[in-house]
Amino acid sequence: MIGKSYIGNLLSAKGKKTYRTFNPLLNIENPTIFTEATSEEIEEAVSLASKAFKEYSKISGAKKATFLNAIADEILALDTELLKMYCLETGLPEARAIGERIRTIGQLRSFANLVLEGSWVEATIDLAKPKREPLPKSDIRKMLIPIGPVVVFGASNFPLAYSTAGGDTAASLAAGCPVIVKSHPMHAGTGALVASAVIKAAEKTGMPNGVFSNLLSSGIEVGQQLVTHPKVKAVGFTGSIKGGRALYDLAAKRDEPIPVFAEMGSINPVVILPKALKNRHQEIAKTYASSITLGTGQFCTNPGLLLGIKSDSLSSFITHLSEEILKIDPSCMLHPNIKKSYKINKETVISQNNVSVVANFSSDVQNNFAQQAIVTVDGKSFLENPTLHLEVFGPFSMVVECVNDVELEMIITKLEGQLTGTVISDENEISNFSSVISALQNRVGRIIFNGVPTGVEVCESMVHGGPYPASTDSRFTAVGVSSIKRWVRPFSYQDWPNQYLPKELQNQNPLKIFRFIDGERTNEKIV
């Protein structure tokens, strides 16, 4: 079962191209052989999804909620088998696997609650005014409807929460869109187990065959074929700028371009203001040493850029940060390829002019373990050298020493779009840096006060996105129930007979959802 793709509810392995996953902690291949999906299997999965959409797009919120909760139950039922596979394929500890499973279950249940209540469709009704002068007004009613089959790309750094049944999949299914997952090759076994849970849930709750498929893939070919398939209507991706941009460009070149919602690179700038540095530089250094190395630095919200105004306090902060980060034991990266990229990118940044290495773990480490590092550079060099803006995916951060707040603001303004920005401040200090704060707000999707960017709370108010290249569309979030809006489109009915309208728009309001009727929010029926 593990080594085959799910084409709807059937297991399939028609191809000849095979591969294995890798245990980075033991530095060995895992035993299971996986078979990459063929063009024929891709066609079957997409055709099934397109056919399933006709039924699934009209399924009630209550039934979708039952399905989503059943997926959560089936994932839990995998128990230690899933946890063991997760650890074998990532080198991460069991505690991380349990934590990510909790998050995955929470996401599924939160979307279940959302669609069960039903008001998320944003039903809006403008009643007819046949006697209006000089022209009568038609009855117009609007709501959000699903856009069609969605392709979800599994993420390397979150095998559960951002992959097979992760946030993109949960949001798409909640919206009424069938999902085809392009499984990530680094954790194909974990993905296959989760896929089996989704399929079981779909069968138990009577969902149409094709509402979910999981396609195995060792390279880029399967993803390319999926994105260019005319029956696919949207794409969800979490990963590198290079990968996300390639998919975005492919989708734009189609005869019918489709949206690609990609969450990509970010160095997550942290602005440490002067008073905070003077009063708390040692405390801040210890906090950020932990944040930089958390999860071996393999979070998209890792603080890769620390900005401060040159002073004795900033120098003391750099010294303490360097000391604290070297106290932390190195840990395992997700895959040898990720370790290789980390090493190359770190050395690329270190080799640039005027970059000083102030901390670099130099003792021997196990295979695939990352050696953390801190470097510094002056503000002028950072502004003049775009290479210094490179995301180094791993336990690495750069401290930029700015000459004054004008240079600090200029640096922020010149940054690419970011997922997060953080401000470390004492008392009312931020009131003296309003232009710096405004500049930061214009470059990020979430701004944090006196905290760390690592850790993304899954809640309705969370924005996990930002200006390009943090994401391909800064109007949307990839985390929280609001992420459902990526997989829907607004649709209006004009002068439509009441009995033929969707229940969400009927006069009687049988679902008792909240709607806007002539501008007033209410859950009352129209009389």
Image: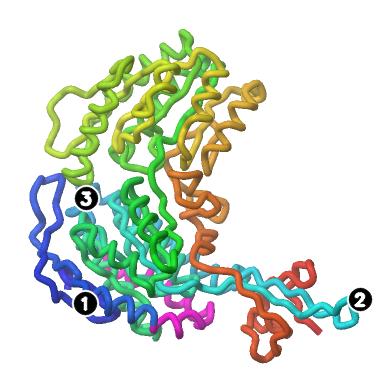
Q: Amino acid at mark 2?
A: Glu
The residue furthest top is 312
Residue 516 screen position, x and y as percent: 73, 69
246 displayed left or right of 63 = left
Residue 354 sits above or below residue 241 on the image: above
User: In the rendered image, which quarter contains the C terminus?
Assistant: bottom right
> What residue is at 41 percent from the left and 61 percent from the top?
168
Q: Earlier in the sequence, mark 1 or mark 2?
A: 1
Q: In the rendered structure, which segment of residues is drawn in magenta?
A: 51-79
In this figure, which residue is indicated by the disc labeled 2? 133
Of tags 1 and 2, the one toward the viewer is: 2
Give the residue type at disc 3. Thr
Q: Which label is found at residue 40?
A: 1
Task: Report if the CB atoms under discs 1 and 3 are less than 8 Å apart.
Answer: no
- Residue 66 in the magenta stretch? The answer is yes
Q: Is 461 placed left or right of 27 in the picture?
A: right
User: Badge 3 is on which residue?
Assistant: 90
Q: Tell me which amino acid carries mark 1.
A: Glu
Q: Nearer the viewer, residue 419 or 426?
A: 419
Q: Is residue 113 visible?
A: yes
For label 1, count other residues whose C-alpha is less than 10 Å away and answer few (under 14), some (14-19) or many (20+).
Answer: few
| Overall secondary structure of the magenta section | helix
State how far apart marks 1 and 2 are (Cα): 60 Å
| Left-right relation of 352 to 91 | right
- Decide which of 497, 288 is in the foreground and name it: 497
